[in-house]
Amino acid sequence: MKLDQSHRDALQDVLEWRRDVRNFKPDPIADDRLANLRAAMDLAPSVGNARPWRVVQVQSPDKRAAVIADFEDANAKAAANYSGSKRNAYMKLKLAGLHDAPVHLAVFTDHTPAEGHGLGRQTMPEMLNYSTVAAIHTLWLAARADNIGMGWVSIVNPAKICAILDAPTTWSLTAYLCLGIAETQDDTPLLHRKDWQENTPTRWDTV
């Protein structure tokens, strides 16, 4: 298949409108749409075709409450690292949509996958983590193309999340994700709108 300008334009739109969503409508996401997102992750690249990502959909109210409590604890500790106006700015940021998002996904990396037979990761075992990140980005783009917003919650204690969700000892948490319909559509990142950090150009050197 030869891709043309219409494909490039569509991809550019998805890239520009992919945002880290923190404000969600309560509307549920239909099972068939979630199945499509799962299928999209199957298309993600991975080292040696190891497929190390493991996704846990968190539906239990008790487990969700425990995750939210961990986020709030971690967020308070993170805020303590700032002072003055920067701390005030931090405290005004909404950094997660855990209360509102209808779908919570914990994405783990399995560090002992049978798939791939070790190909491509003997010298760089961290490639398993990178493969999971590639799958998450694939999910993110596929969700945005289906008008589903996604937010990546990094302000959590990975060990606690693993314990809350009874993850196998060979798994490590790579991401905790919130999915749902965004309350508003915006092509400007929140951190830009809040004057926290503008994008810097990609450094691309020649040697």
Image (cartoon, rainbow, N blue to C red):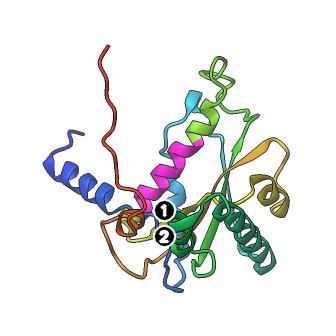
Mark 2: few/some/many CA within 10 Å (<14, 14-19, 20+): few
Q: Nearer the viewer, residue 160 or 57?
A: 160
Q: Give the x, y percent position of residue 200.
A: 33, 45
Q: Is the residue 173 above or below the residue 37 in the image?
A: above
Q: Nearer the viewer, residue 54 or 160?
A: 160
The residue identified by callout 2 is 33
Q: Decide: marks 2, 1 in contact (CB < 8 A)?
A: yes
Which residue is at a point 54% across and 58% down the rendered structure image? Answer: 38
How many angstroms separate mark 2 from mark 1 (CA)? 5 Å
Res 82 quadrant in image? bottom right
Q: Nearer the viewer, residue 107 or 193?
A: 193
The residue identified by callout 1 is 36
Identify the amino acid type marked 1. Answer: Asn
Helix, strand or loop for disc 1: helix
Residue 26 is inside the magenta segment = no
Residue 140 is inside the magenta segment = yes
Which residue is at a point 85% across and 45% down the rendered structure image? Answer: 169
Helix, strand or loop for disc 2: helix
Q: Which mark is residue 130?
A: none
Which residue is at a point 47% across and 50% down the rendered structure image? Answer: 137
Res 191 quadrant in image? bottom left
Q: Residue furthest left?
A: 5
Q: Name the quadrant of the N terminus.
A: top left
Q: Which residues make up the magenta segment?
A: 132-143
Q: Name the quadrant of the C terminus.
A: top left
Q: Give the x, y percent position of residue 130.
A: 57, 37
